[in-house]
Amino acid sequence: MALDLPIVNPAVPAGADVKPQDHLPGNGLGTGKKAHIVTLGCQMNELDTQTMFGLLARMGYSRTDDPAEADVILYNTCSVRENPERKVYGQVGLLKKLKEAKPHLIIGICGCMPQSRVERQKLWERLPHVDLIFGTMNLHRLPELLMQVQETGQRVMEVWDEEGDIVEGLPVVREDRLKAYVTIIYGCDYRCSFCIVPQTRGRQRSRRAGYIINEVEQLAAEGYKEVTLLGQTVDAYGKDLGDGTTLASLLWRLNEIPGLERIRFTTSHPRDITDDLIIAMRDAGKVCEHLHLPVQSGNNRILKLMGRRYTREEYLALIDKLRSNIPGLTITTDIIVGFPGETDEEFEDTVRLVKEVQFDGAFTFIYSPRPGTGAPRLPNPVPEEVQRTRIHRLIEIQNEITAARNRALVGTVQEVLVEGKSEKDPARLTGRTRGNKIVVFHGDEALVGRVVPVRITEARTWTLVGDVEVAAAARTA
Ligand code: SAH
Ligand code: F3S
């Protein structure tokens, strides 16, 4: 059957009517059946999973969280580090029993792992009970591929090694009613020597602003209050469009959308933070003052070997500029410890940088060699025990800093988008500040979906505790 999707990425003027397609292949094939998807990895994968649920729903599938009652089980995989890859072999291996008991069960593996030729071959051979393998770049082909498996009874592997045109208008089944992810740029044109993402996600491709604006307008009309714009290097948005569109110009246009309260974006590369973007973060009222800005290392020799294209001094100068221009900015980061050849002294440079910057939070990772990247060829790999000692030390230091940054907010009033009851403490509500910190507080459930002022009374390492400013909340009602 021919693929009947509006591929392409033509110039669509803002406000143009882009209709999602409702004539996908495989319609009705899933009626009465259930699908279960396991998602590993980043927000991009989470959104891909929501899109796959959208495609599956069009086919008639409903969603189940219980693999035992599923007719289709998909593993949306992550290749950034070795651990999540191992997990796939382990967990999918265990599904063999389920498949034996239920021969019509279709098991599929998708996402980043199959994008590697070597890995997909390995998956194919080592997991013979897997029926379907596809990649990140042909995710929209899921209905067609499922249909092939069902009709032929054969195993199917289809992975695109070249990024095709951006497919617009795919259906998405979102988990949240208030907050939505919207990808604005696919792939990455940097080549950090440790990172597999450029291989798994391909070259940088920005969506046309018109499509994004349409999608966000639609979300706001449906009652969504917050969007997070996604990209591996989200601040490089527009560079490849050649029409002058930038993340800053997009933010200003999204800032106009009625009903939408908040705009976030992640992940930013330090090299692509422009003055225009800083101004948009400062002045566009809906753009939240939070930046996730991976530094990876605080040592110049390591940064160079990593191919990060900035020095420690440039990174620190950027932080200064950001902080002095954007009041209340929170900054989080990613750090890799134990990169090949990293000496104790070089690691100490990272510790010093962490202490100097005072990040609000940091994701820390032990370096994991990735096939097809440059870093594994570097001499003097750091022994695992040393990597572990370093990461523990770094985590301890950062936790103290995170706690101190949170304590500094005690007594302040923060705007909080109320998300619902706190899972850990159902007597309280929970939400996030503009700076992306979680706050729990007492309040009526009727506040869910509203932005309310909350006075912070207590800081814990990961969450803030507060009270709604009743008078102010009444004024804003
Ligand atoms: N720009 C991307 C980066 C994806 S990977 C983004 O959207 O976040 C996320 C983080 O994983 C990186 O910032 C890096 O700190 C870490 N990472 C990537 N490759 C790694 C590797 N080989 N070993 C350990 N950590 C890695
Ligand atoms: Fe990876 Fe570096 Fe791009 S971390 S996603 S290659 S900016």
Image (cartoon, rainbow, N blue to C red):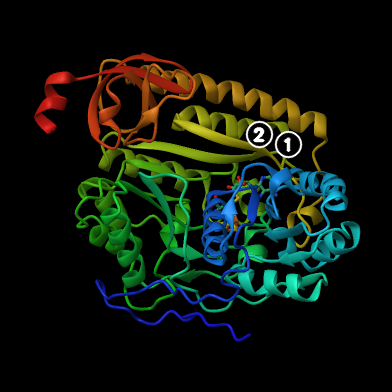
Q: Which disc, if any, is residue 206? A: none
Q: Residue at x 64, y 75 (%)?
A: 144
Q: CA distance from mark 1 to mark 2?
A: 6 Å
Amino acid type, residue under disc 1 in the picture: Thr
* Residue topped by disc 1: 343
Left or right? Give the position of 326 relative to 30.
Answer: left
Amino acid type, residue under disc 2 in the picture: Phe
Q: Quadrant of residue 152?
A: bottom right
Q: Quadrant of residue 159?
A: bottom right
Work out which quarter of the rendered image holds the N terminus and state it: bottom right
Answer whether residue 415 is visible to the viewer in this image. no
Q: Give coordinates of residue 164: x percent, y percent.
A: 57, 78
Left or right? Give the position of 415 relative to 48.
Answer: left
Q: Quadrant of residue 433?
A: top left
Report helix, strand or loop for mark 2. helix
Q: Is residue 344 above or below residue 443?
A: below
102 and 429: which is toward the camera = 102
Q: Residue at x 63, y 59 (%)?
A: 197
The outermost residue toward the front is 32
* Residue topped by disc 2: 347
The outermost residue toward the left is 475
